[in-house]
Image (spheres, rainbow, N blue to C red):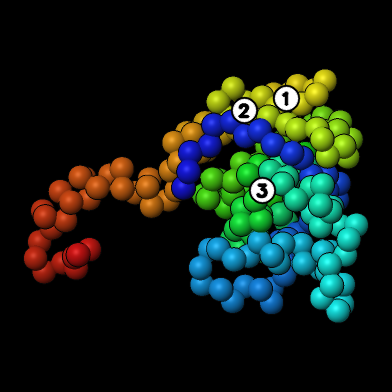
Amino acid sequence: MNPVSAITGQMAPLPRANVDTDQIIPKQFLKRVERSGFGPFLFYDWAYDHEGELIPDFVLNRPEYMDAAVLVTGPNFGSGSSREHAPWALEDWGIKAMIAPSFADIFYNNCINIGLLPVVLTEAEVGVLTQLAEDPTNTVTVDLENQRVVAVGFEASFEIDPFAKHRLLNGLDNVALTLQHADEITTFEVTRPDFKPSLS
């Protein structure tokens, strides 16, 4: 995955609480085996009507928000099932960071695993950013290195687990983390007795 240091871009406001993973990417779109291609189905039940036509006033359908990189949303975002497709869909659409008062734990970790930055701020701070995001000309910078969020007339700090921060700053997904120990794994394998199973 690509390293994450600072993200600067447009905000999209989605001030809804308890958005679960089935709302982020409905179950009927989970048939793909690749990680890509889920973006068009992001928030499908909110973005399309029963005839499959775009709902013009849904925030991510509005032309002025088509380049949004940061989603500003409500508490307990990503609750429900543990499907990894939810962060995949957000990433595939173009979202690079999300700001909310809280995230569901499994969803939060799935985001870290693919380099999608979840940022927790207070409800009051998220409320201010939501108001700023209502003006699509406003941008925000999410600075992971310094753990700061900066927008017009707004600045706040956020906490993040040091190991998660290390992974994001260095672009380390689960495979890359394992490959950091490639020499030790090779040494272990060559010293195993022949009668035991091999990784090769």
Mark 1: amino acid: Val
Query: Mark 3 vs mark 1: which is more N-terminal?
Result: 3
Task: Answer with left or right where residue 75 lies relative to residue 188.
Answer: right
The residue that disc 3 covers is 95
The reply to whether the C-beta atoms of the residues labelled 1 and 2 are less than 8 Å apart is yes
Q: Amino acid at mark 2?
A: Asp
Residue 122, above or below 57 = above
In the displayed structure, would residue 193 be above or below residue 16? below
Relative placement, left or right, of 58 versus 177 is: right
Q: x, y percentage for residue 39?
A: 66, 61
Q: Is residue 71 left or right of residue 184?
A: right
Mark 1, residue position: 150
Label 2 packing within 10 angstroms: few (<14), some (14-19), many (20+): some
Cβ atoms under marks 3 and 1 closer than 8 Å: no
Q: Which residue is mark 2?
A: 143
Q: Is residue 108 visible?
A: yes
Label 1 Cα neighbours within 10 Å, binned few <14 / some 14-19 / many ≥20: some
State the image coordinates of residue 4 (x, y, percent, origin top left): 53, 37
- Kind of element beneath mark 1: strand
Residue at 24% of width from left, 47% of height from top?
A: 182
